[in-house]
Image: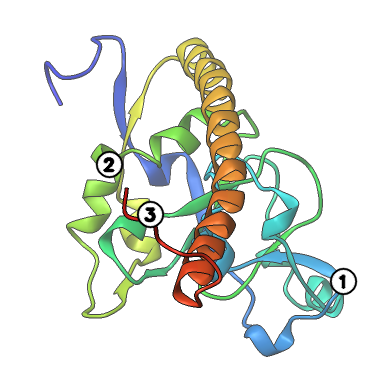
Amino acid sequence: WIGEIPQEWEVGKLKHHFTNGKGLPITKENLILEGLPVISYGQIHSKSNTGVDINSQLLRYVDFIYATEYPQCEVFQNDFVFADTSEDYEGCGNCVYKRDTSKLFAGYHAIILHSIQSSDKRYFAYLFQSDCWRKQLRETVYGVKVFSITQKMLLNATLLLPTEGEQKEISDYLDSKCKIIDSIISNKEAQIEPLESYKKSVIYEYVTGKKEVHND
């Protein structure tokens, strides 16, 4: 890293900033309509997961009894939940970051990173999205059709560490910029749906003869 990062930045191991744990020993069959909020492998890999916050669409639910039987699976503010498997290299390192204090537990095929210091970890959330950071995991994962990530791999991963002040500045800037970009994407996606419907309507009308092709 020498010569590639600012001089005042440090390089450290993830294990010096987080402790690790596993998600609940549950399956999809244990999910119910209402109950204890959980987030599992499938939601972590969801397209609606930004990796830097948790929206309500990602939440699933299990019986509250799990909170009593597996208190070690609770996810607290500034913790991360990683998927422990991925079907492709791109997804290796997918995670969610818990910004708030709401009740949440990690579900199946999930690894919890508990923040040792209760401080803002948004910078890490953005760092974990970068290809330069994920390259470490992609070079160590194993598997053929499904690539597995272990707790040891995560704990031994290297972190780029700006000063706390710079971490906040970077995070605030990226929050602002990503909000604008996400809004643009959302608007474009809203336009795509009616266009897809129009395309299907045009195809239907011409292949069924409801409209005639005119050669000008």
Residue annotated with mark 3? 93
Q: Residue at x 59, y 26 (%)?
A: 179
Asked whether disc 2 touches disc 3, contact meaning CB atoms under 8 Å apart, the reply is: no
User: Which sits earlier in the primary sequence, circle 1 or circle 3?
Assistant: 1
- The Cα atoms of the two marked residues, 1 and 3, are separated by 28 Å
Residue 79 % position (x, y): 60, 46
Residue 85 % position (x, y): 39, 71
Residue annotated with mark 2? 131
Q: Quadrant of residue 147?
A: bottom left
Residue 128 % position (x, y): 40, 41
Disc 2 residue type (three-letter): Asp
Residue 102 % position (x, y): 81, 48
Disc 3 residue type (three-letter): Gly
Nearer-the-camera pick, 156 or 202:
202
Nearer-the-camera pick, 23 or 20:
23
Nearer-the-camera pick, 62 or 163:
62
- The Cα atoms of the two marked residues, 2 and 3, are separated by 10 Å
Residue closest to the far left: 3
User: Which sits earlier in the primary sequence, circle 2 or circle 1?
Assistant: 1
As displayed, is residue 165 above or below residue 98? Answer: above
Residue annotated with mark 1? 35
